[in-house]
Image (cartoon, rainbow, N blue to C red):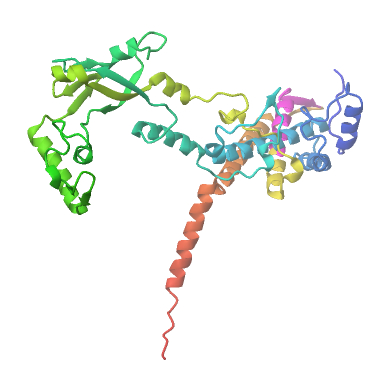
Amino acid sequence: MANILIYSGSSDFAAASSSYYANPTGSSPTPFGFYDNDVQFKADANKVTNFCARRLGWPIENVELQDIQFWAAFEQAVTVYGNELYAYKQREDYLSLEGAEGFSYSSSVVNQTTFENTLVTPNFSSIVRLSEQYGEQAGVGGNVDYHKGVIALTASVQDYDLEAWAIKNGVTGSNGEAQIEIKRIFYQPLPASFLFLGDMGYNGTAIAMFGDTAGYTAYGANSFLMMPLSFDMQAIQQVEMYRDVLFSNYSFELVNNKLRIFPIPNADDANSQCLYFEYVNKIERLDDSLTSGSGQINNISQYPYNNPVYTTINSVGRSWIFEYTLALCKEMLGYVRGKYQTVPIPGAEVSLNQSDLIASANTEKEALVTKLRDYFDQTSRQSLLERRNAESTARQSELDKVPMVIYVG
């Protein structure tokens, strides 16, 4: 078996990096090369290697790792830190950025300024999109078109199937079934104000119910005296009461797109009246709620985040990275020492500590990730606002205990 070199006590990341990029057939300093060109990463790579080796027992004990394994752990630790950081940012900003456009992706690389250095101001874009649907349902806005339909009344026929009307007029899906949703039925008679002030009354005569005193008094063919507005309002109310008491009540009942109208149409209605309604096409509603495109954020995986820039990570973040690198190195060393459970020496055997190393490494990694997530949660927008509110309450409580100055004039 070849005598494989182990950590000797020194490493030179800059030299290894230069050799690799000058001769691509050589060994890469790190598995992915995410941070190989980062000046601060290069400077810290050797320091982290020395730190981890000493924490693992070198030079008292051999550390069966090579410098490239320390560097691989260092690269992974930085990447894990970035993943946790940007996962937190995505949770914070997703509602404000969902559906944002203008991003082009090519071979999994974003060809645009990414979000590492972008401050996202909370906005109501997703709430507005949802509000549009409420507006459409309430008939006061939205992003779905309202269509108008009309059915001719038939004498003595009180029930009308609007789904049959939809099929006849092509408001159907690919299966031929009706895709209509009724939003409004225009069942009301002419308003009393129109009957009061319009040209035609109930029997084809101008203001036949009140004569010349219904809001105005005529003086000649084209001369009128305007009456007080209170008188007009009372006259309109009298028209409405007269209609409610003496005439049929106009109304309707709609169940499963089956329309029943009141009163039952008579022969005069059938010859001269139609019933109008507004509806939406269910397929259009679904289509209008879907926005497709390759250059927009449709889900968490499409956030334009790259790996972090190591130079910009502060001392708090780097301290976490160093500790996580050590845990990864401890794990690798455990797997290496697990190749042989015991090593024979003259007159005895030496047992290796594989299980201890791996168990300790797993515990430390889990604790570090939990600590980092807790830290991010404590600095979230919601947590900071809650803390500010608590501080404000405590400050006001303290001020309330300060004696008020009594002024004597």
What x and y, as percent, mark residue 130?
A: 44, 34
| Image location (x, y in percent) of residue 388 | 51, 57
Which residue occupies 70% across, 23% down?
Answer: 106
Q: Is residue 202 above or below residue 233?
A: above
Most distant residue in the left direction: 246
Q: Nearer the viewer, residue 186 or 390?
A: 186
**From the viewer's perspective, is residue 263 above or below residue 161?**
below
Q: Between residue 319 and residue 399, name the one nearer to us.
A: 399
Q: Quadrant of the N terminus?
A: top right
Residue nearest the observer in this picture, 257 or 205: 205
- Give the extent of the magenta segment: 325-345
202 vs 294: above or below: below
| Of 170 and 193, the residue lying toward us | 193
Q: Residue at x 80, y 40 (%)?
A: 41
Is residue 282 something one can see in this rendering?
yes
Does the segment drawn in magenta span residue 14?
A: no
Asked where in the image residue 24 lies, by quadrant, the reply is top right
The residue positioned 17% from the left and 34% from the top of the image is 201
In the rendered image, residue 272, in percent from the top left (x then y), is placed at 21, 20
- Is residue 352 visible to us here? no
Magenta-span inclusion, residue 340? yes
**192 horizontally vs 330: left or right:** left
Q: x%, y% of residue 384?
A: 53, 52
Q: Residue furthest bottom?
A: 409
Q: Main secondary structure of the magenta part?
A: helix
The part of the image, by quadrant, that contains residue 366 is top right
Seen at 22% across and 31% down, the residue is 188
